[in-house]
Amino acid sequence: MTQALDQVDYNTLDAAKLRFIEAAKRTLQFSPAYGKVPLSGLGGSANAFSFNLAPYLQTGTPELFVSLVPEGLGTADDARPDDLSEEELRQFWWNIGIKILSCLTNDAASSGMQTVLLGLYLPSSTPETVFTPAFLDGFLDGVVEGCKRIGCVYISGETPQLKTKMIPGRLDIAGSVFGVMPPGVAPIDGTRLAEGNAIVLVESTGLHENGFTPVRKLAESLPDGYRTKLPSGQELWAAMNAASHLYTPLVQAVLSEGIRPTAMENITGHGWQKLMRSAKPLRYVIEKLLPVPEIFQFVESQLEGGKEMMLSVFNYGAGFAFYTETEQDGERIVQLAKEQGLTAAIAGRVEASPTREVVITPFNITLKGESFGIAKGA
């Protein structure tokens, strides 16, 4: 007995790949200071980027600091009701396009890197159900907009069909970015972090990319699920899905001003514990808070654990942190943030301490270092 060949759905995959290539073409001019992609070669198995070394040679810099950051979006793209309209779906996927750029490039920005190149990896088992018009229109427009804001080129991608490894109807969204330090600037690695530093916090839009597992579980327990209305009238799924802030432009503006933060942190998983990312025994005292997005206030009212739990898991309104040697540098960062439409504030200071800890004085909460095993410089 013979049977039909079970093969990959190349018709659907090839159609999707063409859309991804078209999106890549829209980003080719977004990083002119660092180089370009010859249009004639785009669409090949390995696209080439012509890197402009002239600015580095002019500064006499003996080293070129680069970074390669891989990251995945996790379950953020699963946090939605099943009855979204086509318009709602396009907006949802547009926000997801921004979010994958955020989780990749904000990490790179925490050391001062300017993202130059982006690659994406989106496997699925049923491409015919995931690469819908709403997904392709919304997601790719979001990716292109994110690349434009950051100043990077989407250069490559892969959309494999993995029939035996993926849940039907779902896809994984992951990627990697290649970043470089600006000419003449060394990476910000936290070695200069010290007592007396000022701490500048920059606002978030909400969850960004972290904390979706407990909030998804919460949504499933509510009578109206993801359609639950928050006090403002916004639905829960929309609040969870708010497009994340992209901090690379602010970081580059800070560095171009000649300001050299002693450390920078992207506040993601582990919440405000990330403020004590350095392995140094220091106390981070936070005395001023930024406005807390409504999504966090709602989640806090529904889950056990109170503010200590919220601060240990979520960014709670503070998406990025700068540490500066002087308050004058901190004030300048606050102004630069304002010029980019971001709210920031000198929120606290770094103190000497026998152990790592974060003290949030308005809430009388202390987050201890022994509960946060991740440390930079250990």
Image (spheres, grey):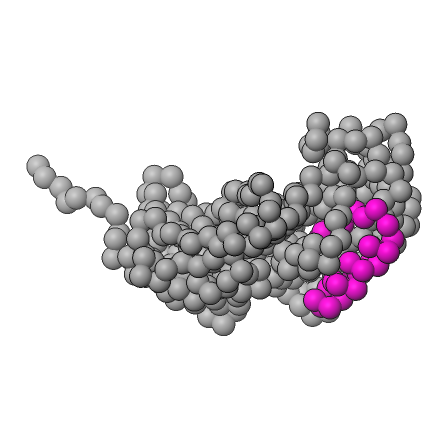
Q: Is residue 37 left or right of residue 66?
A: left
Count of number-bearing discs: 0
Q: Position of residue 68 (x, y in %)?
A: 52, 42
Q: Is residue 319 magenta?
A: yes
Residue lying at 87% horizontally and 38% vertically, measured from the top left: 195
Relative to 354, 267 lies left or right: left
On-image quarter of the C terminus:
top right
Q: Name the residue nearer the viewer: 157 or 232.
A: 157
Instruction: Say above or below: 125 vs 234.
Output: above
- Percent coordinates x, y for residue 260 in the rendering: 74, 49
Q: Is residue 330 left or right of residue 378?
A: right
Outermost residue toward the left in this view: 1
Indicate yes or no whether the magenta region holds residue 164.
Answer: no
Q: Nearer the viewer, residue 330 or 255?
A: 255
Classify 39 as above or below 175.
below
Q: Residue at x 44, y 59 (%)?
A: 36
State the image coordinates of residue 153 (x, y, percent, origin top left): 47, 58
Q: Nearer the viewer, residue 32 or 233?
A: 32
**Which quadrant, please, contains the N terminus?**
top left
Extreme bottom residue here?
A: 87
Q: Is residue 25 visible?
A: yes
Q: Is residue 227 visible?
A: no
Residue at 82 percent across and 54 percent down: it is: 329
Corner quadrant of residue 269: top right
Q: Position of residue 349 (x, y in %)?
A: 87, 45
Residue drawn 79% across and 47% down?
A: 323
Magenta stretch: give its range. Answer: 317-345
